[in-house]
Image (cartoon, helix red, strand yellow):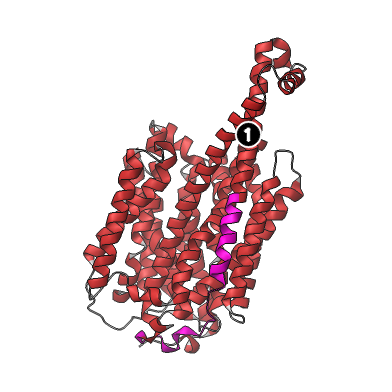
Amino acid sequence: MSVSAAEKPGAYRWVVLGLVMMGTFMAILDASIVNVALPHMMSAFGVSRDEIEWVSTAFMLATAVAMPLVGWLASRLSHRTLYLGSLALFTAGSAACAFAWSYDALIAARVIQAVGGGAIQPVGMAIVADLFEPSERGRALGIWGTGIMVGPALGPTLGGYLTDWFNWRVIFSVNLPFGALTLLAGLAYMRDERPPATDRPFDAWGFVLLSVALISGLLALSNGQDEGWSSAYVYTRVAIAVAALTLFLAVEASSSSPLLDLSLFRIRNFSLSMVLAVFRAVGLFGGVFLLPIFLETLVGYTTIQTGLWLMPGALAVGLMMPVAGRMADRYPPRGLVAFGTLATAISLVMYGELDPLSGPLVIIGPQLLRGAGLAFMMSPLITAALNAVPGPAVATASSFLNVAQRVGGSFGIALLNTFVTNAIRVHAVRMGAQMPVQSTAYQRLQARTAHTAVGAASPRAGALLAARVVQRRASVLGFQGGFVIAGLILFAAIPLCLLLRPSTGGQAGAHSSGGARR
């Protein structure tokens, strides 16, 4: 028999929240922890750079495909069974990655790991929504969401440390003790509260079409920069993604048991949350993606040093998530989310002044503001979305909110990477045109390089060094522009934030379709 959130003991709810948070953090962390170890894996298995990229790409694609399944599985299995099964699969996949004997075995193990990890996040969100009443759900989601926001920031640092001090296999084996302990604690403590029996059939056509759309779209976004945005590779995958998505929507509209109930999009807070998840991903990855590359390539920090510089931002998010969640239980979401979006946008624009000689305040200050902004962009927004949907649809809503976040992250990285790359090229050409060899500015720059050992060796070496200085300056300007464009994108999201409606304690009518009218 199902027990309402109000009837569940407080201690039980918070312990389960901790178990769910642990699994979610591990799954999110593993999406980013491997990137710094890819060169070591490439050497270990003797594969090319394009091949080793599939260690990350396979994980991304399998995660995105697994997420939409959660809604249907939750109608068949209890949340406890689904969560612990996903955690067991993720832990088993981590063990297989750690002991992979070949490149093919590693890719297969990453897919297993991703299927488990992809389900952990949305089912964890559904568990939190089920455990806590709408009036206190914001605080709980704020605590749970800390792992989602902190994981991407800590991943590269932890991965670099483990790889440098041990080897690349440790980044996977470190999951084993934490996964095993969380699994055993869940088996011993979590209750098996089964949902009402259902014979809801599986929407196989909907799943296949959505999977094709996600895989094709994500491949276009992740490889577009290397293949060229106007290449046949990108055009073909975009066309496949659009066609598959169109067919998916047609199938869902006519299905009696759809994978995604399209009536959910009539709920204003849910629809806006899906859109704003993409904007939030731009804000998140504007710092997690651009800033580390800037610090490593233009300032010269190691991966571990860069991680230490990023730590204040991760701590700010971790500290502010529970605060934002508690406020989400007391105040309407529109003002909180608009404040978070504004703070994140300002923090990114502030990085428009970042250069290799910037001091600690210039590097850390915007991170603190951005951390607070991201916290207020997430907790109140997810709370508003889940409070608005009817109870049986919470698992489905959770899974598709996570899909939107995943697609938004890929879109954000592709957009910013392309903008920065093109901006660097444009600035280099412009400065080269303004500073020909005969110009006074070029002669002055070359005169400065003549005082160095390279410049003194030969005029040609001095000219090459001067050209590198021009390229370096163009790179700085390109990154500055990337931060600013990310901030401007977030400014554009503020009007959408103001359209959010006050939370109605949505699941009072949780088990009726009336929630769809909100």
Where's residue 512, x and y in %? 36, 87
x and y, in percent, of residue 480 in the image: 64, 44
Residue 512 part of the magenta segment: yes
**Residue 298 at x, y = what percent?**
64, 36
Residue 403 screen position, x and y as percent: 41, 61
On the rendered structure, is 161 left or right of 52? right
Segment tinted magenta in the rendering:
485-513
User: What's the amino acid at mark 1?
Assistant: Ala
Q: Is residue 344 left or right of residue 86?
A: right
Residue 200 in the image: above or below residue 221: below
Q: Residue at x 70, y 38 (%)?
A: 356
Up/down of 12 relative to 166, above or below? below
The image quadrant where one finds the C terminus is bottom left
Q: Nearer the viewer, residue 189 or 353?
A: 353
Residue drawn 53% across the image and 61% down it: 280
- Is 251 one of the magenta-colored residues? no
**In the rendered image of this protein, does residue 422 appear above or below residue 257?**
above
> Residue 246 or 362: which is nearer the viewer?
246
Quadrant of residue 78 within the rendered picture: bottom left
Predominant secondary structure, magenta span: helix
Q: In the rendered image, which residue does mark 1 sit on?
A: 474
The answer to whether any part of residue 29 appears in the image is yes
